[in-house]
Image (tube, rainbow, N blue to C red):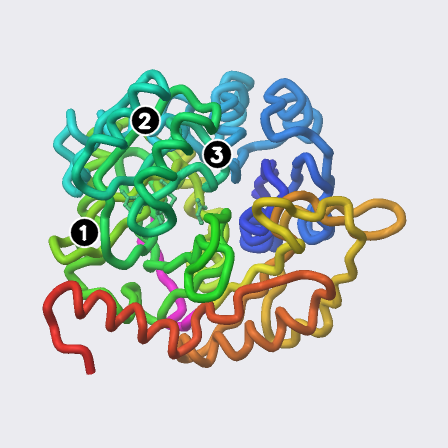
Amino acid sequence: MTETVLLVGGGGREHAIADALADDTELYACASNRNPGIARLAAGFAEREERDADGIVAYAESVDADLAVIGPESALEAGVADDLEAAGVYTFGPSADAARIETDKQFQRRFMAEESIPGCPAFETFADAAAAADYVAAVEHDVAVKPTGLTGGKGVRVTGDQLSRDEAVDYVRESGYDEWVIEERLVGEEFTVQAFVANGEVRPTPAVQDHKRAYEGDEGPNTGGMGSYSAPERTLPFLEASDYERAVEILEATVDALPSYEGILYGQFMATADGVQVVEFNARFGDPEATNTLPVMETPLVDVLTTARDGESLPELSFAETATVCKYAVPEGYPTDPESGARITVDEESAGDARLFYASVDERDDGLYTTTSRAFAVVGTGPSIAAAEAVASDAVGAAGEGLRHRSDVGTAASVQRRVDHLAELRGGTVE
Ligand code: AMP
Ligand code: GLY
């Protein structure tokens, strides 16, 4: 039987999900922007805000959806999964309550502490900005300051890295958020491990390294992610196999403590001198990380979704032993002052051997327009990270005019810097 699937969300992550489902399902999609890549793969596309649970449920019913997949955290927070389930549509994505593991950072850290989930940094929570700022001024070590709620990946600041203590105090006092988590700064190399979770089972996928900072060399403000890479094996060049295994153990411990969780559990980890620590959890695929993971997943995505729905054991996942490099093209000024509403041309032919995933662009009658977020991603694959990088690099420059990207994502020099950094922190010799 062909399943009728509704996909919620219109970014690069959702284009990658659509790509993984389109051949095996009757696919429908809804998002606030008309993503031309998703629209082309889908039998129908409705423009709906991602938080518009009523509108999304009505669309799911109108297309007679058998199951739904939710891409963005905003939809999860708004209870779209709850409302679709209530309407009888099985939804791969957690309830709003379970999604607090991402959407409420105070909950996330308290949960880790109460459940003794390994890898939790020292933290304090605050209900008002003045108290949080006083704490930042007084504490002796470097800290990460985090507004409790969703900020699109752009709300966190880290002292000793992005800003001074005084700047952090001013930021906490003046940025308009009330509730804060202030935690110990972790030093090391970040990596992501995403897992499919259903019926208490956890199926991890290969590690990915995202690049959150806006500019080359990890300078500038945080973004939703400028690009990312994965290796032919499940781990990454700077990690020990035991780091990846530890990350998976942490995801498993988390799911043991959240028995009704269904969907993707995304762990953002820091490999440090003292082992693997948790930077955060997300309740959905990463963007860009989904664009690394799904194109090399050999197990059909629809099989994972239907076994989850039917309460069966999830399939063991198989991945091509191929490296991937994703590079995002973003509007000038992104993320602080992005140029939205600019008309752009994307030349898919020029992407060559790379896959091109459209992101937060809007297709209108007279062409393609930027929004305030990332425009498109290209993903190169190859036998090594360097080979995949060369494919992505050729594609990203050729495919879009007037957009910016980070040329260093996945280059041999950049990956080696990360290997050296962690080796140095761990007291090893740097070759
Ligand atoms: P988050 O929104 O929690 O993922 O944070 C965004 C980024 O801030 C992370 O990817 C890290 O680069 C950085 N970050 C968050 N928490 C910490 C921490 N405790 N120590 C160092 N960096 C952090
Ligand atoms: N790439 C980071 C995220 O999706 O949150």
Residue closest to the eye, 29 or 273: 273
Q: Which residue was labeled with disc 3?
A: 151
Task: State which image quarter holds ligand 1.
Answer: top left
Q: How crowded is mark 3: few (under 14 residues within 10 Å), some or many (20 or more)?
A: few
Give the label on residue 246, or none: none
Q: Which amino acid does label 1 sit on?
A: Val
Q: Name which of mark 1 and mark 2 comes first in the sequence.
A: 2
Q: Which amino acid does label 2 sit on?
A: Ala
Q: Are marks 1 and 2 in contact (CB under 8 Å)?
A: no
Q: Residues within 10 Å of mark 1 (few under 14, many from 20)?
A: many
Question: Does residue 314 show up?
Answer: no
Q: Is residue 61 magenta?
A: no
Q: Which residue was labeled with disc 2?
A: 133
Residue at 42%, 24% in the rendered image: 95
Region of the chain picked out in magenta, as a range: 314-324
Asked if the beta carbon under badge 1 is closer than 8 A to the nearest atom of ligand 1, the reply is: no
What predominant SS class does the magenta segment belong to? Answer: loop
Q: In this view, does 331 lie above or below 389?
A: above
Residue at 49%, 75% in the rendered image: 389
Q: Is residue 319 magenta?
A: yes
Quarter of the image where the C terminus is located: bottom left
Give the label on residue 276, or none: 1
- Distance between mark 3 and mark 1 Cα atoms: 25 Å
Residue closest to the eye, 75 or 328: 328
Task: Give the residue at the far bottom of this rendering.
Answer: 431
Secondary structure category for the residue under label 1: strand
Q: In this view, does 356 lie above or below 115?
A: below
* Camera-nearest label, 1 or 2: 2
Quarter of the image where the N terminus is located: top right
